Amino acid sequence: MEKEKNIEIHETAFLTSTLRSLNEDLSQDYFAKLWRNTKSDKWIKKYLDLVSSEETNTHCLRNRYFLDTIKKLVDDNDVEVLINFGCGFSMYPFLLDERLIHIEIDKPEIIDYKKSKLMNWQKTNTLPKRNIHFIAVDFSEDYKQDLLTKIFSIKNNKPCFILIEGVLFFLDRKETDMLFDFFNMIQKPGDFIGSVSFQDTLKESLAFRKLMAFLNQIVSKTKESDYQTIADDYYRSQPTYQLIDHQDYFSLSAKYGNVIQLNKEEILNENFYLLKKSNR
Ligand SMILES: C[S@@+](CC[C@H](N)C(=O)[O-])C[C@H]1O[C@@H](n2cnc3c(N)ncnc32)[C@H](O)[C@@H]1O
């Protein structure tokens, strides 16, 4: 592949949304297609060819798992606020009950663009009206005090679900530890975290090697060590949280009747973790 103009990390959000729009029956995200554009369509075609054609359905099932999980918790009155860290262009606010309060956090480039687009689409009735608060933050910087104040002013003590999907891969361990400490600061016992990551063992697979080659070609970061994988133990050993559910692409495919096309080596198998803050 010829060296092309790099895309920035935040632009990967366009790619994720495009993938979700390619199998709406599976993702149940009927609004992801609003973010499609010729540049991301072009990258997605290359991505599916060069990395793994299974990536459409891995992304669709990820959306479906969190959508159904959060829906149930909202129905049961266990969650009133959804805080999406590294929200990108995900569209949960419009797929979930209108009573839910949303806090969308990402880099300023994403937040400014998403905010103006969503406000416009709500004004023109392309999207239903929702209660959304946008906060621009870079997780590589010192955000704690300011973000804490902003989040508490919105959520007070309401029960919340923190979602972090498709983000930890781009952060290092120190930034990840800081985020999980921060989650513990803002959450009460009974609150939830939904997190997504690749297991360390995926690094040996053909699909991961293809992903590295692809990213090396198009994204501004270059080395394998720039991308984080996480062992299950990281979640199991969070001191004040209990791991209450753990799924991956294979278990969710079985649950939702998705027929897997490729062999294991050729699939970027993401793992999905649901944690609940304990009373300790
Ligand atoms: C692949 S996208 C996933 C977006 C969204 N969570 C989803 O699943 O649709 C990765 C997101 O992580 C965000 N991100 C990566 N590094 C970040 C950082 N240091 N601070 C804040 N956001 C970051 C990017 O801006 C981008 O929106």
Image (cartoon, grey):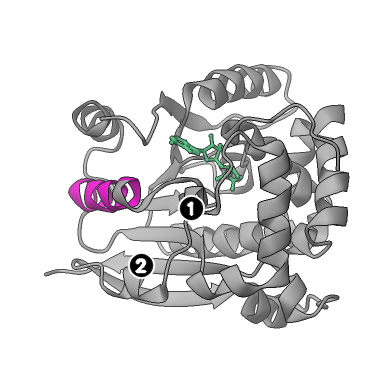
Would you say 170 lies left or right of 143 here? right
Where is residue 64 shown, x and y percent of the image?
65, 61
Viewer-nearest residue: 141 or 146: 141
Task: Name the residue type under label 2.
Answer: Leu
Q: Which quarter shows the C terminus?
A: bottom left
Q: Which residues are magenta?
A: 175-187
Checking the image for residue 225, the label placed there is 1
Tag in front: 2 or 1: 1
Disc 1 is placed on an element classified as helix
Majority secondary structure of magenta residues = helix
Q: Which quarter shows the N terminus?
A: top right
Pointers 2 and 1 in contact (CB under 8 A)? no
Q: Residue at x 56, y 26 (%)?
A: 110
Outermost residue, left side: 280
Count neighbours of disc 1 (C-alpha within 10 A) and say few if under 14, some if 14 to 19, many if 20 or more: few
Q: Let me know if residue 114 appears in the view.
A: yes
Cβ(mark 2) to ligand 1 < 8 Å?
no
Where is residue 71 shown, x and y percent of the image?
53, 59
Disc 2 is placed on an element classified as strand
Where is residue 49 shown, x and y percent of the image?
88, 55
179 falls in the magenta region: yes
Establish if 135 lies above or below 273.
Answer: above
- How many angstroms separate mark 2 from mark 1 (CA)? 27 Å
Task: Name the residue type under label 1.
Answer: Ser
Establish if 146 lies above or below 12.
Answer: above
Task: Give the residue pinned by disc 2.
Answer: 275
Where is residue 258 shown, x and y percent of the image?
79, 75
